[in-house]
């Protein structure tokens, strides 16, 4: 791995993230109920963009094995502290994209959960309501792998969660095989990225889609929708909806 000096101020931000993402029992219970739709004991989950590992913890509570990718040194260190002795958690301090090699990660030291490998994401955030205070004040070159490479190394996953701040379509472009269930984050400042993800998934198989808004941990649709219908749903959301996760499940 590439040795880096982590930006000043990040320790305080990580402490806040640990409280927010691990410290709410009701949120954790809702998260477990949501992911229990996609994972059962013994399944394999890929967590792409793990941050401080709240999803890793949820997947483990459900009895799933986890491959976690987190390129930022501070958050990766937090995951090691929480799950480092768990043989069913494999942590790679790396990014994921459409090709193997390296990528430049732009660090938001005050809010590392929105650090990103996407210049377009930073451009979309510039001046946008709700994003004006965000500053990407450092950068680091990190290793980058692909979903296909992870499958070759760890075996086919039962569920893949992708949350990489505008780089989601690049991650899905590195997958050429069907996965039973996949989630990817969307933001209302980059709806085009979500539409690209929907299109990529359509090339892999007959997926049906649902969505959870923000951190609600609750699916919004009574019945899964087509890619076209999900695209229409996302386009109709108000800007204030901000973000959420689209869930794709292979149709029987």
Image (cartoon, rainbow, N blue to C red):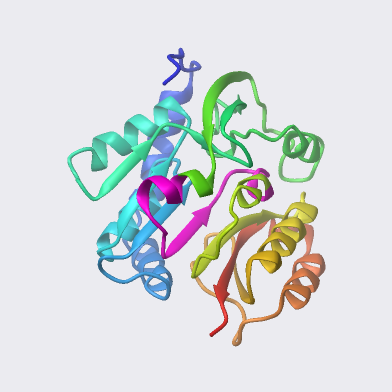
In this rendered view, identify the residue nearer to me: 80 or 145. 145
The part of the chain drawn in magenta is 150-169
Please indicate whether residue 202 sits to the left or right of residue 54 in the image: right
Q: Quadrant of residue 243?
A: bottom right
Q: Residue at x 57, y 68 (%)?
A: 247
111 part of magenta stretch: no
Q: Give the image location of residue 20, x and y in percent.
A: 42, 47
Please indicate whether residue 126 sits to the left or right of residue 56 in the image: right
Q: Is residue 129 above or below residue 231?
A: above
In this rendered view, identify the residue nearer to me: 150 or 47. 150
Q: Residue at x 78, y 57 (%)?
A: 239
Please indicate whether residue 133 sits to the left or right of residue 114 in the image: right
Locate the N terminus and report the quarter of the image it occupies: top left
**Badge count:** 0
Which residue is farthest front? 152
In this rendered view, identify the residue nearer to me: 157 or 68. 157
Q: Give the image location of residue 148, x and y in percent.
A: 52, 49
166 part of magenta stretch: yes
Q: Is residue 226 above or below residue 172?
A: below
Please indicate whether residue 68 sits to the left or right of residue 105 in the image: left
Q: Quadrant of residue 69?
A: top left
* Visible residue check, residue 49: no
Q: Give the image location of residue 12, x and y in percent.
A: 42, 27
Q: Residue at x 77, y 37 (%)?
A: 120
Q: Give the image location of residue 170, x and y in percent.
A: 66, 45
In this rendered view, identify the residue nearer to me: 137 or 85. 85
Q: Quadrant of residue 32?
A: bottom left
* Visible residue check, residue 123: yes
Q: Residue at x 74, y 34 (%)?
A: 122
């Amino acid at each position: 791995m590439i040795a880096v000096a982590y930006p000043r101020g990040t320790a305080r931000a990580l402490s806040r993230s640990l409280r927010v993402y691990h410290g709410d029992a009701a949120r954790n219970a809702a998260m477990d109920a949501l992911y229990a739709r996609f994972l059962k004991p013994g399944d394999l989950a890929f967590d792409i963009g793990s941050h401080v590992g709240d999803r890793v913890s949820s997947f483990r509570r459900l009895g799933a094995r986890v491959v976690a990718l987190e390129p930022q040194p501070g958050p990766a260190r937090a995951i090691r502290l929480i799950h480092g002795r768990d043989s069913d958690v494999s942590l790679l301090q790396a990014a994921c994209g459409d090709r193997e090699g390296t990528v430049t990660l732009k660090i938001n030291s005050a809010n590392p959960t929105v650090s990103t490998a996407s210049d377009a994401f930073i451009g979309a955030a510039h001046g946008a309501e709700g994003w004006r205070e965000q500053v990407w004040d450092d950068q680091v070159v990190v290793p980058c792998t692909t979903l296909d490479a992870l499958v070759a190394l760890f075996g086919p996953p039962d569920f893949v969660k992708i949350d990489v701040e505008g780089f989601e379509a690049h991650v899905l472009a590195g997958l050429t095989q069907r996965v039973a269930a996949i989630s990817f984050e969307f933001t209302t400042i980059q709806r085009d990225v979500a539409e690209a993800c929907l299109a990529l998934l359509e090339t892999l198989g007959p997926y049906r889609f649902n969505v959870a808004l923000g951190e609600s941990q609750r699916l919004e649709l009574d019945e899964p929708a087509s890619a076209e219908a999900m695209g229409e749903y996302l386009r109709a959301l108000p800007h204030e909806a901000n973000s959420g996760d689209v869930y794709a499940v292979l149709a029987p």
